[in-house]
Amino acid sequence: MSAAKAKMREKKMRNQPASVQYPSGVNGEGGSQNRGHGSGGHPSSKERKKPEDTGWVRGHQRYGGGYSKEMPKYITGGAFARARAAEVKAMLRAVSQTACSSHVFQALPKHMRRRAMSHNTKRLPRRLRDVADRMREKSLQAGSKKKKEPAKSKSRKARRRHGNLLLDFNRRQRKNIWLETHIWHAKRFHMVKKWGYCLGDRPTYKCYRSCYRAMSSHCLLQDLSYYCCIELKGEEDELLAALSQMTSKEAGPTFAAALCLSGRRQVSVTIYRIGQYPCQPLGPVTVLWRPKTPGIRGRQLWIWAHPTLKQDLLPELQSVCRCWEAVPPSIDPEVLCGKEKSAPHPKPENILEAKLKPGAKRKRSSVDASEPPVKKILGDGTRLPGTTVTWKSSSTGIVINDLTMEIVRYRLIGPQSHSVLTEALEAATVCKEVDKSLGSTFWWPQHCSDESNMLLHQQQADVFHTLKGISSTTELPPGTVLGLTVDDPRLTLPTKKMKVLPCVSQAQEADEDKRKELILRGVPEQCCQSSLWEESVRDDVTENKIPEQALNRMKSEMLVPGSRLSPTPPQGRVPVLLVHQPGKQVGQEMSSWGAGWDLLLPKGWGMAFWIPLVYRGVRVAGLHMGLKHSHSKAAPIFPHDFPDCPAGIRFQEEQEAEFLDKFKRHPPAKRTNYIKHGCLAPFRCPWQQLAEEWEHLTRGGGDEPAEMSVAKPLSLFIVLRNRKSLRLLSGWCRPTTSTGRRLNRELLPLSQSAVTSFLSAHGMSLVWVRLSLLSKGRPELHSMVCVPTAEDLKLLGKHQDLQEPPHRDHFKSRIKPQKKSLKSDDPEPRSTPDSDLIFGLWPDPLPSVTSHCSRVTLGWTTQGDFSLCAGHGEALGFVSVPGLLNTLLKQAGEHRGTLLLRNPGSLHYRFAKVNVEV
Amino acid sequence: MVPHILSFARYLLCEVNVSDMNDLFLLNDQAVAAAVKAAVARIHGDYGAALCSIRFQVKYLNAHTGIVFLRFPKSCYKLLWSALPFITHINSRGQKIPCFLNCLHVGGTIRTCQKFLIRYNTQQLHRMLPKCKNEGEKQQIRQAILGCFIPGGNKEACEDDIECEEDEGE
């Protein structure tokens, strides 16, 4: 019996009378002589020591003489009566007092019990009321004694007051960065803390299919502001010389691609460590060059990278550009003067981080001058005030600037995203009044005063107008950039949420020509220029944003309610950049699916653009939908699908820990036994082992290759990104029967010699493949990609089940004795190596991953789901290049490229078609 | 949690009658239990002995008054009860105590037995009072009757509880 139980029982039995008898020990042996005298009359050890409980013993002791051995001299009823009386007293105590563990009403018979008796003592019979009251008081006291009362928080009303709310928000932003749309998202989304940010994962309402529909036919909006922007400034030659060390032409476009360099296109580039191609990749980034500006000599480019990539990328960039000279964060005079206007006590440490909305907390700061005024955090709230964000190089003149959270990035996915954009945004109205004395502090009137700027603005507005006429976003050349200055979109906010429909009407001749030009050539080079590139303009715009409150007041003061505010306030112009986002570029099917636009804004304007966009009937998605978008596009996602990048490795480890934790939360009997399913690594993919084993297998499998693998154990696997090789592989994967595709130009036919030469270059490589299931089935994460045997291929299309024979779990027996030894508390040395055994999982040194199952394993999938746009299950993953080539060699023409797919928790194999897409 | 089916029991409130009052002090619960078991085995054979080993227990024994609570399973208490009159002696501490058991009450719970016992004992005391021979004796019995009742009733006991709990808390 446990201690607590014993205590409970002791408490319960406290009022119950114990047996009254004499111990059989010392006194009892001596006969009855001693009994009844002095200590001899001491009751048994079961008796309690309290004097009032032992009433009869007392009585007995006093009159013990009456119970002597000899014949009594006189007979008295006293002793008899006392004994009875004592017993009655004990019994009374037992009967009248309830055990402490139960409530008073539990002593009542069932038919007298009432609802909520413990809450309201008046429901008890009157005779029990005072007892119950006392007990209740006691329990209340005990409760207050045990828990410290929580610090009295302010009332809800006080907490929701604007200033206090801001303080609270700022406190909560210290750990994780909040995007500007955080509050909006937090009300509607499941939020996750990832990569140092608070991000919306998926909405709380059901919208999987509607989001897909929006993606494929209308528009889906996602806040991508968490992507980090790194700005590089310097001479073009210097920049290119430095950056070319990190890329290779073989792996796709580089920083120097002509269209990209002119600033007309955004391209995606895979970055490697300096001079390490093809090993040690860092990850993909998107690159955007600023078009050549007449006044400025140097060039400027933005590198957009995933937050997990930034910590690897930034040191690499610094070393390649030799930028180690940290520039202390300077205080922009314009910012400062903006500050002094609004806040009487600007704290220097807050200037970079927190920009005050003008007039936000004037009352508070005037009342309590010692306290710093509450400011809304814009940008990175976690960064310390003195953190360096700018590095300069004295030798090359390159300046690296970390623009994380300085620029808001929204992604609109879907064929109608241009309609949404053209509906929500309006090219800025030109500032006519030349009232220099009044509006000179804002950038737009100054900008307007220059004639060339106005001309450019007119051109940009024309292009933007033409954009309205095109029928689908996919028609545009991928990566097109358009710079623009727009009016404050809050001015044209519709009163009701509406759905934007494409306008394909009034095709005039001139418009038609313009449209064709736009579709064919893209945006002309000069129109890609935007004031967003200028830091001073960005700061000015952020600083002088009209607060919501002021804007609403202006609206309410208008004569005709609901009409547009005119003239537009001078600070209501925002420079933006529109970047076309290419859709599916690889493969033949669903070409350019999921194209869209990225909208780049200066910070602080996030919500001002978000709400108008949402009011145009877009769907809003989170990270989850972003994954599905990439899945449908068959594009690898960073960091999920980059197992050779440092960020990808870190991600894999985190993912494994997360899955393992989830797995362990189930009791062993309710877990999937992955050993029995023949699944060696359900939570991670041992890519290195796979690549090594396949290399070993292809080298002949004799003694010599073993030596080879011993000789160079440090060669790491790489993911094949060489365009030429990928194209070759892609051609080999296709079935040879379809004659149209057979006629590939300059493609080597698949032969033993070609394969050998290919493998000599890419022996340790993995290749990114898309697997589309031929029959039913929904592939999952970490499904195994296997090679079908010749007999399996005969079953293809015959609706017969292919199954893996169940494996035996040899570790089960080793787990059980371990448990026993744990119980008996003797740590045996034998059981220590087994201590990390988890039921249902293979312990660490895995056996051969390729030949563990009845079908040879080629690789694993890293994404897998039922694809709504393909109509069947689709999986994306990596397979070993030598394995794939060997399989293809053995397969006959019509079945070429048919592989098997098996989920980690299942024994069924499904046929799938492999595609290498370039 | 005890299975519910087992918790059905009958409690027999018996009085051990001895010829010599001092013999009562020799009694203990094991001795009584052994005597009951022996009697049942003698009367009802192996079957009885087996029944007796199921849930039979001496719940309470007062060596001053000779009151015994016996717990029998409800399913067979009548059979076991029928053997009780055949107890003629109890072997306790190496001595043979001649006695017989007189069943006063059969209850479903200990609580009812306790209530009965209170009534029975007070009745006894009240009967004794008019039969007293002298004043001293009368006085003693009167005191005993008054002493039966817990002064202050429930209230004091509850306060006592609180004190106890506070002790435990520290």
Image (cartoon, coloured by chain):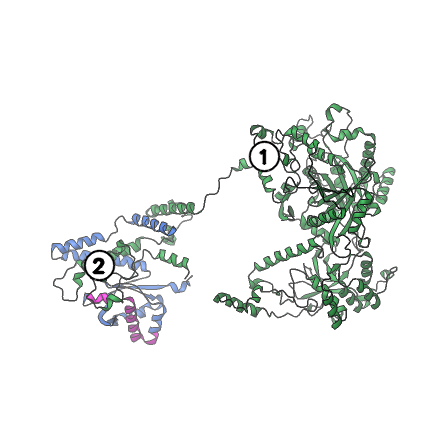
Chain colours: A green, B blue
Chain ID at mark 2: A
Depth check, mark 2 against mark 1: the one in front is 1
Taking the spot 36% from the left edge, 49% from the top edge, the residue there is: B166
Binning the other alpha carbons within 10 Å of mark 2 as few (below 14), some (14 to 19) or many (20 upward) gives: many
Compared to A249, does A763 lie above or below?
below
Chain ID at mark 1: A
Q: Under tag 1, what secondary structure? A: helix
Q: Under tag 2, what secondary structure? A: helix
Q: In the image, residue A47 lies at what x, y percent?
A: 29, 59
Q: In the image, residue A668 lies at what x, y percent?
A: 56, 63
Q: Is residue A667 magenta?
A: no
Q: Amino acid at mark 1?
A: His
Residue B95 visible somewhere in the drawing: yes
Q: In the image, residue A383 lies at what x, y percent?
A: 64, 42
Q: Which residue is mark 1?
A: A162
* Nearest the eye: B117 or A160: A160
Residue A901 visible somewhere in the drawing: no
Q: Is residue B23 magenta?
A: yes
Q: CA distance from mark 2 to mark 1?
A: 78 Å
Taking the spot 62% from the left edge, 35% from the top edge, the residue there is: A375
Q: Is residue A174 left or right of residue B8?
A: right
Q: Which residue is mark 2?
A: A83
Binning the other alpha carbons within 10 Å of mark 1 as few (below 14), some (14 to 19) or many (20 upward) gives: some
Q: Which residues are magenta?
A: B22-47
Q: Amino acid at mark 2?
A: Ala
* Nearest the eye: A388 or B71: A388
Prevailing secondary structure class for the magenta stretch in the rendered image: helix
Q: Is residue A234 left or right of residue A179?
A: right
Question: Which numbered disc, 2 or 1, marks the residue that appears first in the sequence?
Answer: 2
Q: Is residue A858 left or right of residue A674?
A: right
